[in-house]
Image (cartoon, rainbow, N blue to C red):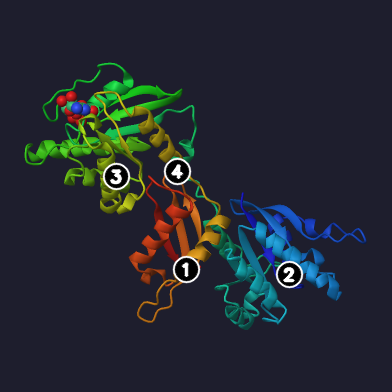
Amino acid sequence: TPTVTIVGRPNVGKSTLFNRLVGKKLALVDDRPGVTRDRREGNARLGDLEFRIVDTAGLEEATEESLLGRMRAQTEAAIEDADVILFVIDARVGILPADRPFAEMVRRSGKPVILIANKAEGGAGLSGAYEAFSLGLGDPIPFSAEHGEGLADLFEALMPFFPEPDEENEEDEDDPSKPLQVAIVGRPNAGKSTLINRMVGEERLLTGPEAGITRDSISLDWSWRGRPVKLFDTAGLRKRARVEDKLEKLSVADALRAVQFAEVVIVLLDATIPFEKQDLSIVDLVEQEGRALVIGLNKWDLVADQQGLLKDLKEKATRLLPQVRGAPVVPVSGLAGNGIDPLMKAVFEVYKTWNTRISTARLNQWLGEAIEANPPPAVSGRRIKIRYMTQVKARPPHFAIFGNQLDALPKSYTRYLVNGLREAFSLPGTPIRVSLRTGQ
Ligand code: GDP
């Protein structure tokens, strides 16, 4: 569960907000004399969102100068732990000099922040809310902790930091006792049936020298190093020139079906004629369907200069397939039975990558650095501002980026972020999705 931390100068209503979210008068019970708790924590609930909430109000009573420094140190530590910060100001009083050091700490942390203009019940203190823009922490939510106003807006602002309960994905969570669904797709004659025969160890599939001899999509249960695997074979994608249109469509539909069943897709190329146009469209299909990807270079036994070709094909893959940068490229020979272990190792690796979840804190730390290294451009006078990001889904990793004017963000910049994410969190072999959301 995410940690949400309340930050702000004394008297803005942090404890009241804490109580409101925890739903009990928990923050007030500790009245033993001499006990100064640096922070309070509770389990909070807002709508169907559950989170850990931290209140940094503990040292408010500490008026002495010497304690002010300690209060700031504690706030700093609490910010460090936070996934999201609720920065509270008093909308009636407006921004005071005392707000600024706290705002500065929050800004420096690079953590996502939701600005709360408290004590704004019944529309009071709107001018204070507008002043709040000057803190540079985004648009304030008019709020009243005491009267429970603004909770819906707060809910909406918090929602992105919680993984969407995605039913389909929940069922399929990474469970090693469940068979890993692997599809092997590729052009006719790439050697799919031969490879699958070799894996399963039975001549269950018919192979032959003529193109397109396997007609139907089939699945086979197998296990690799004790892990159950379900293999999907396909009729392959037939060459347009040779086959009439109807048949062509049918086989693409077959491949698509196998890809949709699969978690990981092995795109099998014939290493002696690699990266033909059809191969590239198959990879595109896998990317569009959001599946993890391994590229198998089959018929490796026919290759004379294996080292040279591998280097060459890895470079080609990077250049021709930027959308799946870093996908593993593994030589294999279905006929000779070589390379199946490295191939399957790569399959399980990309599967893990495909399931990756990255904490909001780590993401935003990275995002801050990425933006600093290369800020988003101003596009025809529009100031694009990226505020924060969060992962909304896995399988494949899907991120939401929040900010202002993001509709003007150039595609090249999104690509910069995606490539950076791949690099920083090692996400090769999986599609990465990014949604841009303006107006938090
Ligand atoms: P599919 O259409 O992708 O299922 O391809 P097949 O498995 O039917 O293989 C097509 C042809 O390629 C057959 O003649 C196979 O014997 C041959 N073949 C498959 N894999 C290999 C391999 O690793 N090395 C060599 N030399 N030939 C292979």
Q: What's the residue at 34%, 41% (across, down)?
A: 293
Question: x, y percentage for residue 371?
Answer: 48, 68
Is 92 displayed left or right of 310 in the figure? right
Q: Nearer the viewer, mark 4 or mark 2?
A: 4
Alpha-carbon distance for marks 3 and 1? 31 Å
Q: Which residue is mark 4?
A: 353
Image coordinates for residue 36, horizontal then vertical, percent: 86, 61
Amino acid type assigned to the residue bearing label 4 in the image: Thr
Q: Secondary structure at mark 2?
A: loop
Q: Locate residue 116: give its quadrant.
A: bottom right
Name which of mark 4 and mark 2 comes first in the sequence. Answer: 2
Which residue was labeled with disc 2? 13
Amino acid on which the number 3 mark rests in the picture: Lys
Q: What's the amino acid at mark 1?
A: Ala
- Mark pair 3, 4: CA separation: 23 Å
- Position of residue 198 relative to residue 417, above or below, is above
Residue 361, by quadrant, is bottom right
Residue 144 percent coordinates (x, y): 67, 69
Which residue position is annotated with label 3? 311
Quadrant observed for ligand 1 in the rendered image:
top left
Of circles 3 and 1, the one toward us is 3
Disc 2 C-beta below 8 A from ligand 1:
no
Q: Secondary structure at mark 4?
A: helix
Q: Residue at x 67, y 74 (%)?
A: 89
Q: Dot 1: within a 10 Å radius of its alpha carbon, few (fewer than 14), some, or many (20 or more) residues?
A: few
Relative to 403, 94 lies left or right = right
Is the residue under label 2 in contact with that under label 1 (CB below 8 Å)?
Answer: no
> Which circle's residue, 1 or 2, is located before the other in the chain?
2
Q: Which mark is residue 28?
A: none
Residue 373 - label? 1
